[in-house]
Structures are given as structure tokens and as C-alpha cells.
Amino acid sequence: MSTIRKEKYSDLSQIREIWNSVLDPSITTHAQPAALKGTTLLVHTASSTVSLQLRFILPDIIKNLNAAMNEPVVHEIKCKVGIL
């Protein structure tokens, strides 16, 4: 008989929780983390305009996320128009 193992609290889960607290609500309303592949975070945005706006502040977002997580989890963020 196999046992059910509780899933480890993932980095993506932590990022999703932190995202809304470290970023302005005007951003979080239109952009949300969707996936984490290695050290690259994929963020779904409401439009290509939002993706373009985020490109200007990506270094600050990465710095704030990593500081809140107390470790360098995210090295790159890629934005894609998708379902929020």
C-alpha cells in the first residue's frame, strides 16, 4: 500500500504569496506568476502593454522577490500574455 506524501512547499507557491505584497496593486491586478522553471519565472500578463511596462522594472522585481524569500530563487523573469 502506498502512502500519500504531503507536497513540499514549492518556491512558486512562495513567490505567488510574496508577489502581491512586494509589488504595487496596479501591477498585480494585471500580472501574476504562472510557472517557475529553474531560476526563470514566467509571469502571465493581461496584455502586451503590461508585459512591455514590466520589462522596465524587472530588475527591481527580481531583487524584491529574492529579498523577501531570503535567497536568490529568481534570476530571470519572462512575461507572456495569458490567463491570470
Image (tube, helix red, strand yellow):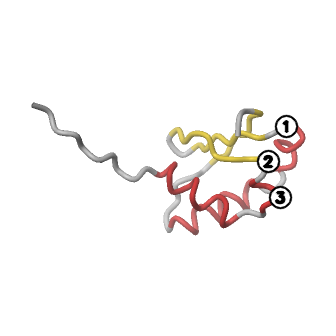
Q: Position of residue 32 (x, y in %)?
A: 68, 47
Amino acid at circle 3: Ser
Q: Is residue 74 above or below residue 22?
A: above
Q: Residue at x 77, y 41 (%)?
A: 45
The residue furthest left is 1
Look at mark 1 in the image and give the residue it sits on: 47
Asked if labels 2 and 3 touch by Cβ distance under 8 angstroms, the answer is yes
- Lower position in the chain sequence, tag 2 or tag 1: 2
**Mark 1 residue crowding within 10 angstroms, few (<14) / some (14–19) / many (20+):** some
Q: Are marks 2 and 1 in contact (CB under 8 Å)?
A: yes
Q: Nearer the viewer, residue 46 or 63?
A: 46
Residue 14: x and y in percent read: 51, 57
What is the secondary structure assignment of the residue under circle 2?
Answer: loop
**Residue 26 badge:** 3
Residue 20 figure quarter: bottom right
Q: Position of residue 17 (x, y in %)?
A: 57, 59
